[in-house]
Image (tube, grey):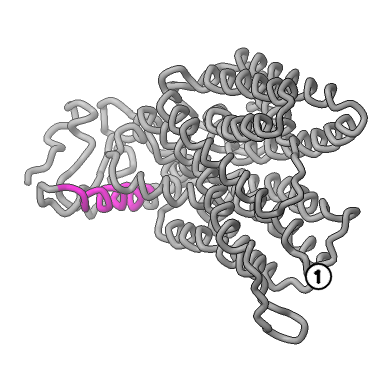
Amino acid sequence: MGSEFQSRNTSRTSSFYEEDVVNDKTSLMADDDYFGPVLNIDDFINELEFGLFHFIIVMASGLCYSTVSILTQSASLLMIFACDLDIQSGNYGWQILAMTIGTLLGSVVLGRLSDTFGRRKTLLFSVCFNLIITIVSAFAFNYIILIILSFINGIGLGGIFASVHAYCLEFFSIKYRGRAIACLTASIIFGSLYSSGMACLILPHEIHYPLAGKLHLTAWRLYLLVCTVPMAISFILLAWAPNSPRFMLKKGETEQVLNIVNKIYRTNSYCHNNGHLYRSVAPSYFSMPSLKGHPGCSDKQKPQQCTFKFRLIKLFKRPMVFKIIGLLLENYLDLQRNSVCFHHENRDKITLYILYGNLLSIPVAVACIVLINIIGRKKLFSCIAFLSSLSIFLIWAVDKALSTIILAGIFAGIIINAWIPLKLLSSESFPTELRSTSLGILTLFGGFGSLCGIMSFTMLFETNCTASFFLLVINSLIAGFIILFIPDTTNAPID
């Protein structure tokens, strides 16, 4: 098969690929005598072939993100089913509190490390961390140990919050990134379904298998071990996956970029029927950052312009500052709505209600994936926020137990999908150099808002039930209104 690089004056699309394997890896560097068009990073990512590789990336990232819902939901169920631990009415919330604090700490620290050393390394560390700690938690012999391990687990969750959307986003072109990140975010529903499904199958059974001394393998311990299966699969897939091409381009790692692109084509070729092995890329016209001097800086940039301080100051220049303020408020108000709690005497019914709520979220997630590129990120989030406020109002208005349970399930199915447009808008609003750091900061403020929401709702619910529900309705309406003033990133180039 002849080379498609017949002339340097041909169009970008026709000259971007080579059918034969290219051994000259230095061809990624821009030639001094080249006089044709120069692609920026967005153009380069848009030219990448979409195929099997991208589905694997979404699956790996999705299983990684499902760890969040698996661990948070399992922590809530353990407060009910871990009867052999010293869990009392005065300390039953400590485990979730410890996990939340760990998540806030991990999101800031690991988010910054993700922008320094790479998203894939951070995700591998976080998933492996959660996998090991969850296995150890299954053999905790008292509640204090479980609380400490939950705090450590939260650190790993913080790394996932800050890095997984940035990692997956940077593989996709403008055409596919909206639905790809929507599918990734919707995988949190898979985590909830998996966790609640395993809870319905395992937790109601009486299991007492002696291990060592007074330690027995009970139902909740087996449940925690089963919850590690998606984490293990995610770790294997991430170990196979390459680094983010956009991140490596910003770092100026041309050798790595060539290997990543060739791996994409080699993987996609497994679904081709035309018989060729794989495509290899040699975009000699691509304007790459120089490998000399400061990493990630072009020859025309001064070293001080590539420092973290300079980029952070640049980030807060208008209009980016309005994006930051708006998204902080969105995360604060969105997480504050997660504080609704219903108490039931029958433990087994609780797991069934959680499972039903997760099943109701599936059609809403499918609708969000379909509409994410049609109506845009901010309009979709605004619609979800208004529907959430309506469902909260109806929960307060009805006076029948069955109707309340149904409405609560509808509310849970709607509100969990608010993360789809919110996470996508947050990831697209910040430059590559600070994307994970910014997502970590948003997680910090969102977690703080969640804690404030839990405390305020609990205090109000005990004194004035009506006021607590109307507070949630007002917060939902404010969130849906504020996001309309944030620039939409639908089909827009990102830095």
- The answer to which image quadrant residue 135 occupies is bottom right
Residue that appears at 79% across and 53% down: 98
Above-or-below relation of 209 to 320:
below
Q: Is residue 44 visible?
A: yes
Residue 167 in the image: state x and y as whole percent: 49, 44
Drawn side of residue 131 relative to residue 375, left or right: right
Task: Give the residue at mark 1.
Answer: 142
Residues in magenta, as a range: 257-272
- The answer to which image quadrant residue 81 occupies is bottom right
The amino acid beneath tag 1 is: Asn
Residue that appears at 66% across and 35% down: 405
Residue 157 in the image: state x and y as whole percent: 64, 51
Residue that appears at 58% across and 59% down: 125
Q: How many marks?
A: 1
Give whichever of 256, 470 is nearer the camera.
470
Indicate whether residue 409 is drawn in magenta.
no
Give whichever of 124, 262 is nearer the camera.
124
Q: Dot 1: what SS?
A: loop
